[in-house]
Amino acid sequence: DVKVTQSSRYLVKRTGEKVFLECVQDMDHENMFWYRQDPGLGLRLIYFSYDVKMKEKGDIPEGYSVSREKKERFSLILESASTNQTSMYLCASSLEGGGGGYTFGSGTRLTVV
Amino acid sequence: AQSVTQLDSHVSVSEGTPVLLRCNYSSSYSPSLFWYVQHPNKGLQLLLKYTSAATLVKGINGFEAEFKKSETSFHLTKPSAHMSDAAEYFCVVTPPDSSYKLIFGSGTRLLVRP
């Protein structure tokens, strides 16, 4: 089975800190994604990457950036964390386009105080 | 624009009774549709997917969904609920402009009473 591993299960950061969320997948998938999940809003796409060093904005990219230097690793960066970025962050990967379905990590619950 | 609406934020059933989770989509074409499940403190898991083959799709753990184009619906059903089915369920659609991206419904939390 494909595994998508997110480095932290829970994080607490202060307003204004730079925050890195790391995601690693072990099955050579081309596509990787970052979503945030908020109650009543479902999942919203922040950024995705379809190849090394390639990235595209999702629906809510403001306040975030990403990095994909290696195929297996996709990092989400909060340049200056704010309280409205308190959320659950989910990483996913897929071998083909969205039609094939994703494999998700277990999520990182980030609290910004 | 592509969208998906889950009609119930919470559904409560007794163990052993049928489950119905409702989903409607808006699309000017035949989309790819999915149901994902999220158990507490876990990532999302693919339950089943519809990609324009048979309209009745069977998934894991006894779940199935029927694509009804005339009603733009993709409801998820299970004949007999089990306690382990308690989770949050997401109906998902692929938009026409990018097969990479998925659009998620707001989720339905399924509670199963003993």
Image (tube, coloured by chain):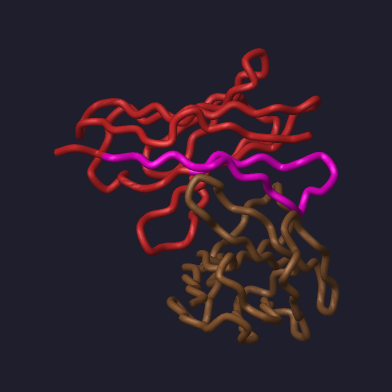
Chain colours: A brown, B red
Provide residue B112's location: percent of width, then percent of height.
24, 39
Q: Image point 57% across, 80% down: which residue?
A: A15
Query: Image height check: is A19 above or below B17?
Result: below
Q: Which residues are magenta?
A: B90-111
Q: Image point 52% across, 55% down: which residue?
A: A38
Query: Image height check: is B48 above or below B77?
Result: below
State the residue lying farthest toward the top. B70
Between A53 and A89, the residue placed more toward the observer is: A89
Q: Quadrant of residue B31?
A: top right
Left or right, A44 with reference to B23: right
Residue B27 magenta: no
Provide residue B8's location: percent of width, then percent of height.
44, 30
Q: Image point 30% across, 26% down: which residue?
A: B18
Provide residue B14's location: percent of width, then percent of height.
20, 31
Between A30 and A90, the residue placed more toward the observer is: A90
Provide residue A104's location: percent of width, then percent of height.
55, 63
Q: Quadrant of residue A71?
A: bottom right
